[in-house]
Image (spheres, rainbow, N blue to C red):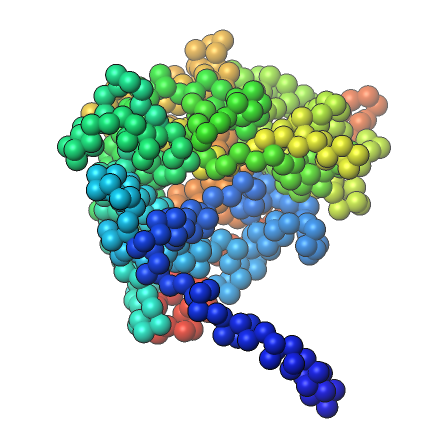
Amino acid sequence: MKKIIKLLAVLPLFAACDDLFSPAIENIRDLDAMYKEPTYAQGVLANAYILLPYQIFPYSDVATDDAVTNNTAPSSSYGNYIYYMRMATGSWTAFTDPMSQWQGRKNAIQYINLFLERTDDVLWSEDALIRKLYNTRLTGEAYGLRAVHMYYLLLEHGGWTADGRLMGVPILTTSESTTSDYNHARNTFQECIQQVLDDAAKAIELLPLDYADLKDGDVIPSKYTAMGLSSISDYNRVNGNLMRGRITGRIVEAIRSQAALLAASPAYNTGTTVTWADAANQAAIVLDRINGVSGLSANGGTWYANASEINGLTSGSNPAEIIWRGDVSQSLSLEAENFPPSQYGYGRVNPTQNLVDAFPMVNGYPITDKTNSAYDETKPYENRDPRLANYIVFDGSKQGPGDAVITTGVYGTGNDVINKENLRSTRTGYYLRKLLRKDCNPDSRYNTTQKHYTARIRYTEIFLNYAEAANEAFGPTGKGTHNYSAYDVIKAIRARAGVGKDNGDAYLESIKNDPDKMRQLIRNERRLELCFENFRFRDLRRWKENLNETARGVRIENLGGALKYTPIDVEVRNYKDYMYYGPIPYSEVLKWSNLEQNKGW
């Protein structure tokens, strides 16, 4: 009765606001408005940019042997790390899947298909040639973006079915409406990879390699002069600096490299026709444009902390390390989440002892090589690969705007000590440094922000793609049809990091003719260079490597003035064998009878 009374009381309000239920005709806009409103048409495609899957926070790393999170209590103030921790410890299901790409990628592809079906009829300009130029570029963007979104669908939802078929996702190249049949069967993984490659080829054909203003006297690219373009100002209007940040031919070439490497990987290669040589060749296309190994950025390993470089980014320009990035934003959220508590952070991501042990000595030898490494268990952080100090805060490190000394050992008295009962301290004895800028200050008295950006695709990733594929296809020192080998790439990456510079990287030289040892080194270099950038979980799965390595930490005691380092188990992983491949969402399988689930889910 109370509800009825309340309803009667508000009915006059509804009567006075008829537009609430029946919008005025001038507010109703359908897709046909695209044809005469190019801004509206670009807005449709813009949704595919808004829905891009790239993530600045290292959420998935806490589900691997590289990190754990101290976010073990559910609270909206603690971020999303807890969902990945639960996934790693036995709660990953087709119903609760924090890795899922299903809805976001499918939504983006729907927008792209709507755009592609209409773009030819959009009045991009009154001038016929300019209209053609805009349509060419935007059509290329749409195909490139569809390749991105399909690739990410395959990363998380491609897998083997119970009857032994490697399947991808339903391929949709036309938009769906209320009258469409949504009960699609999955296409094979090979068909989906081919769709990515086909879309990439179309995008590369239509897009400029990069967006940049031409100056008087510059040569207009031939594919545009073939269309009748002779004016540099017209070229700049469509493909100039103002377009930077959008997808380009160079970016699509990199995405094609990623897709080829995925298909050639152990988890998938028996179900595709993509070879290791194909993957190496696709990566080389990207790398040859920067003159191969000589183009490796000197400071690319610390791209996130190169303050003057970041502060100088304007108009969508990229540092030498970056192929594609997100917008630069002024923030301190990464620091607030991950600085140690003494520096007013929540210490959310805790690197593991497993990862720390993966960093070699500065002479290049693994710490497990007792004969050559000179590793001292009583001084475990001395003479190590410089990347260790760049990426991880360990006991005695400095962090924060004042370079405060961080004590994680149990001998300490501050809040940074391991397992301090404040829901902010480390569980492993380590804090995160990578991705963070020490000149941020989360102290509420200051809240000092700095510029950050998401590195969507780095050249280092593509170099590592090449090294991995070339080692399998041509051997460690083989070059195929290229001017550099897997060995050349790894030597350059390690030299950039400062590894082996005093002994000619003797360890690398000792294994350079052994494909198996080189494979392990390449995978380890990938682990180090790309740590905390959401690669590790997917890499372990595509390699079919152990997902259940217990995450370890270190307990440090001061015994009579000498520090004692004792390894500790922190978090046991609980993955099943079928989890090398992610699930199709449970809700989708329930709805659509033709949508077959991956084995085990």
At 81% from the left and 31% from the top, the residue drawn is 412
Can residue 503 be seen here? The reply is yes
| Quarter assignment of residue 274 | top left
At 32% from the left and 65% from the top, the residue drawn is 176
Looking at the picture, how far across and down is residue 389, in whole percent? 61, 24
| Quarter assignment of residue 248 | top left
**In-image side of 272 versus 178 (left or right):** left
Looking at the picture, how far across and down is residue 316, in whole percent? 44, 31
Looking at the picture, how far across and down is residue 255, in whole percent? 34, 39
**What residue occupies the far bottom of the structure in this picture?**
1
Q: Quadrant of the N terminus?
A: bottom right
Looking at the picture, how far across and down is residue 557, in whole percent? 78, 30
Count of marks, rendered view: 0
From the viewer's perspective, is residue 583 above or below residue 460?
below
Can residue 410 be seen here? The reply is no
From the viewer's perspective, is residue 96 above or below residue 442?
below
Q: Quadrant of the C terminus?
A: bottom left
From the viewer's perspective, is residue 172 above or below residue 552?
below
**What residue occupies the far top of the structure in this picture?**
502
**In-image side of 359 versus 538 (left or right):** right
**In-image side of 572 versus 119 (left or right):** right
From the viewer's perspective, is residue 342 above or below residue 188?
above
* Residue nearer the viewer, 112 or 405: 112
At 16% from the left and 33% from the top, the residue drawn is 228
At 64% from the left and 40% from the top, the residue drawn is 333
